Amino acid sequence: MFIAEIYESFQGEGPWAGTPSLFIRTSGCNLRCRFCDTPYTSWQPEGQQQSLEKLAAAIQAAAAEHVVITGGEPMLAAQLTELTEICRDARRTITIETAGTVDRSVECDLMAISPKRPNSAPDDTQWRLRHEQTRHQPAVIRALLKRYDCILKFVIDTDTDVADVCGYLQGFPEATAGRVWLMPQARTQEELKAKTVWVRAAADSNGFRFSPRLHVEQFGDVRGV
C-alpha cells in the first residue's frame, strides 16, 4: 500500500474526538479540494509502498486500540479490505475517513464520510472539472449509509455552506440529523477560533452535531500529530 505516514496521536474530529489512535494515512486521492489539509496525499502525493505485514506489525506495536485509516482517499487502496481485516483480527476499533466517492467492502466500526460540496472546488482549472465530476456520488453515499455505522461530516467555510448542507441532505432521508456533523474549515489555530462559535451555533440550530478539530486547536497546521 502507498502510505504517506503512520503515527500515534488522538482523534481530533467527530464522535470519538480525543480518543488515542493509530493513524494510517494512505497517499493518493481522486479529488483536489482547495482547502485540503493534507496536500502531500492529494495535490503532491508522497509516501512509500508498505507491505501488509509491515502495517500489521505497526498495528500490533501501537499502544492505541483505535485505528484511523485516512488519506488522501483510503477507499482507493486496493488492499484496504485486507488491512481492515488485519485490524479486526488485532481487535482494534476501526474508523475509515472517506469523501464517499468510492465503495469498497471493508471492516469498520465507523465510516466517517465527508461529502465534498461546491465550496471544495479548486481554483486550478486543470483539476476543477475532474473534481466537480467526481466529488458527488450519491449512490456510493447511500450504499455506505446502508452497510456501515456512518456519520456525515461537512466542512463549513462560510454561512452559505450551512444552507447548502441542508439542501444536500434532502436527498438523503436516511441521514438523520444526529448523524450529521459540521466542522469548521481551518488549518490554523486563528482560523479555527474565528469560526468555531458560529459553526457550533449553526449546528445547534439545525439539530446537527458540532465537530471540533482538536489537533488544529492544539498543534496548528503541523503534520503527523
Image: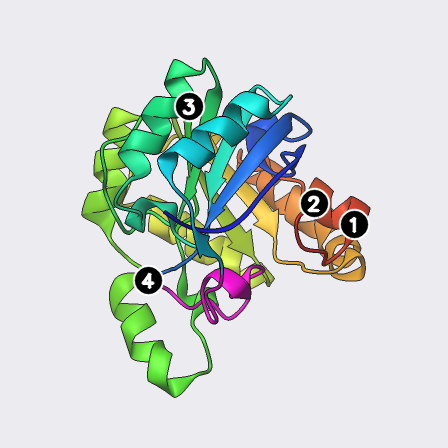
Q: Are marks 4 and 3 in contact (CB under 8 Å)?
A: no
Q: CA distance from mark 3 to mark 1?
A: 28 Å
For the residues marked 2 and 4, what is the alpha-carbon distance in whole angstroms?
24 Å
Residue 44 within the segment the image draws in magenta: yes
Q: What residue is pinned by disc 4?
A: 30
Q: Nearer the viewer, residue 90 or 21?
A: 90
Q: Name the residue beneath numbered marker 1.
A: 219
Q: What amino acid is at disc 2?
A: Val
Rendered location of residue 159, percent (x, y)? 59, 60
Left or right: 198, with 143 as reference point: right
Is residue 108 in sight in this rendering?
no
Which residue lies under the disc numbered 3? 87
Q: Which amino acid lies under the numbered mark 3 shown in the image of this protein?
A: Cys
Looking at the image, is mark 4 or mark 3 earlier in the sequence?
Answer: 4
Of badges 2 and 4, the one in the foreground is 2
Ranked by sequence position, the earlier of labels 2 and 4 is 4
Left or right of 223: which side holds 141?
A: left
